[in-house]
């Protein structure tokens, strides 16, 4: 795997220090090979490696990871960033009918995906992670007059998912079907009109002209390019051609259930600059998911082991944070700013800070937080510290009864809650002092291994 290869590259480099340019360049040659093996198109791989190299050079090597692991983490983060970090929703906020036009090569999965999206929209769940969306009244129309029975295929799917399809009129051309579909959708009050277009085995100009003419007539809110994720080096050409000729709004990657290595996703994204809005994960009509950049990045970098590796690397970064804070505490300092940082970390990690497991006071604090309601309490505590003056944060013993009332008011909490927070802080700083007596955090960490 990539991490093994990088291990070789970095065997000479041990311990601390910055990643040197020569080492990073050597590592990036391996990364480039891994990208090409994952079917990332050559120009895209080249550009990506340039960017990642810039990011990596000069970064400090963390004590707890090898340089190879660290490069993997940098590359993985850069991949996720390039793939698009957030799930992007369909933009249907136009005067109805909102038209969604599906384009792509023959066999890429346009018709299937049309039905998958229609099914979600009709059920009120087109956009992921948001429950209780409005159900849409959806009409589907096939403009595929090339492939025999293509229109019937869509009608059959429509029956399966209980979504209306435009009645078939033999002999009509795509643009005329699009016009008829628009008219029907307007007259019959449809919210969404899905236009499933014809594909070709290869990109050709007649196909592109047809797409353009249909887009002119239908003025789509979304034009989604459907791409088979098994597409290799050709992905760039496909993306470039479609992207040049029709104003794409997003990409759907199909067959992500197969053994695609994810390269097409990166190529598509790099060439079009458009978000990947959905991933098709099977032939069934509910096999449609939000796109997960982390998973695809993992596949590209050489699959599962890298994911866990990166996770371990990230843990080590937390460890560095913890050590930095421990050094501060070893001097007997633990003010409200430190507490706030710890609370934020607890929140980030779902209630378990890196430091929490090591420090008796912190464990207690964690228990306290959990017992009074977890997450919400963390938010309240953060608000209370936010309502303190800088002086109060640095020197919590200044906080008298009058100040407590002010802090409670300012944070929308109660004096009782402020008291709890102060008590927690006191307990923790007492624990810190004990640790100091025991020989400091260093001694303690050594003891814990
Ligand atoms: P079109 O020519 O672009 O309209 O492609 P179709 O929608 O007709 O799909 C072609 C074939 O790919 C069909 O057999 C589909 O069932 C299959 N297919 C589409 N999407 C997926 C997917 O995400 N995963 C898998 N495994 N098969 C898919
Ligand atoms: Mg089709």
Image (tube, helix red, strand yellow):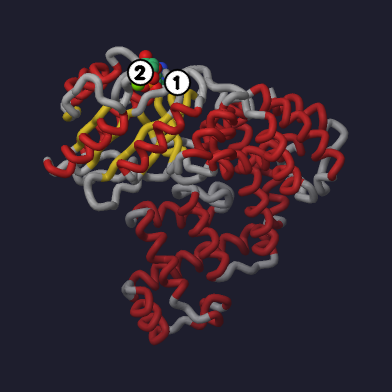
Name the residue at 78% across, 34% down.
Answer: 27
Please name the residue shown 40% across and 31% down the image. 210
Q: Position of residue 224 (x, y in %)?
A: 40, 36
Residue 236 occupies quadrant = top right
Q: Which residue is located at x 33 percent, y 57 percent?
A: 372
Nearest the camera: 101 or 62?
A: 101
Q: Position of residue 425 (x, y in %)?
A: 50, 67
Counting every numbered tag in the picture gives 2
Residue 61 falls left or right of residue 183: right
Q: Secondary structure at mark 1?
A: loop
- State whether residue 306 is above or below residue 58: above
Q: Position of residue 220 (x, y in %)?
A: 34, 43
Q: Marks 2/1: CA distance? A: 9 Å
x, y percentage for residue 128?
Answer: 34, 40
Q: Dot 2 lies on which element?
A: loop
Residue 135 seen by the camera = no
**Residue pointed to by mark 1:** 200
Quadrant of ligand 2 in image = top left
- The residue positioned 39% from the left and 67% from the top of the image is 420
Quarter placement of the N terminus: top right
Q: Are marks 2 and 1 in contact (CB under 8 Å)?
A: yes
Which residue was labeled with disc 2? 146
């Amino acid at each position: 795997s990539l991490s093994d290869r990088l291990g070789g590259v970095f065997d000479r480099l041990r311990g601390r220090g910055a990643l040197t340019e020569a080492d990073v360049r050597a590592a990036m040659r391996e990364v480039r090979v891994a990208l090409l093996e994952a079917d990332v198109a050559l120009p895209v791989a080249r550009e990506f490696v340039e960017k990642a190299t810039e990011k990596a050079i000069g970064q400090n090597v963390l004590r707890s990871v090898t340089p190879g692991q660290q490069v993997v983490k940098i590359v993985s983060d850069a991949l996720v960033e390039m793939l698009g970090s957030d799930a992007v929703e369909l933009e249907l906020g136009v005067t109805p009918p909102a038209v969604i036009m599906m384009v792509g090569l023959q066999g890429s999965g346009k018709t299937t995906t049309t039905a998958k999206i229609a099914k979600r929209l009709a059920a009120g769940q087109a956009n992921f992670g948001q429950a209780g969306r409005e159900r849409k009244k959806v009409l589907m129309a096939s403009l595929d007059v090339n492939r025999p029975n293509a229109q019937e295929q869509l009608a059959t799917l429509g029956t399966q998912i209980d979504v209306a399809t435009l009645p078939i009129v033999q002999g009509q051309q795509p643009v005329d079907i699009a016009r008829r579909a628009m008219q029907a959708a307007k007259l019959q009050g449809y919210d969404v009109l899905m236009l499933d277009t014809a594909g070709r085995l290869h990109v050709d100009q007649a196909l592109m002209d047809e797409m353009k003419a249909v887009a002119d007539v239908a003025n789509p809110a979304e034009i989604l390019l459907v791409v088979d994720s098994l597409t290799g080096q050709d992905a760039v050409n496909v993306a470039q051609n479609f992207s040049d000729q029709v104003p794409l709004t997003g990409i759907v990657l199909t067959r992500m259930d197969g053994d695609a290595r994810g390269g097409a996703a990166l190529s598509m994204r790099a060439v079009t600059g458009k978000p990947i809005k959905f991933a098709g994960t099977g032939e069934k009509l509910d096999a449609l998911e939000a796109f997960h950049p982390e998973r695809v990045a993992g596949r590209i970098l050489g699959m599962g082991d890298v994911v866990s590796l990166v996770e371990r690397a990230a843990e080590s970064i937390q460890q560095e944070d913890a050590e930095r804070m421990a050094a501060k505490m070893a001097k007997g300092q633990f003010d409200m700013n430190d507490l706030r940082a710890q609370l934020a970390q607890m929140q980030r990690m779902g209630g378990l800070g890196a430091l929490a497991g090591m420090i008796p006071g912190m464990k207690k604090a964690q228990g306290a937080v959990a017992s009074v309601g977890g997450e919400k309490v963390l938010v309240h505590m953060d608000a209370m510290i936010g309502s303190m003056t800088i002086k109060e944060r640095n020197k919590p013993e200044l906080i008298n009864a009058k100040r407590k009332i002010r802090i409670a008011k300012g944070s929308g909490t109660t004096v009782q809650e402020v008291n709890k927070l102060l008590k927690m802080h006191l307990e923790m700083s007492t624990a810190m002092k004990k640790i100091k007596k025991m020989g400091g955090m260093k001694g303690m960490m050594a003891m814990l291994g």
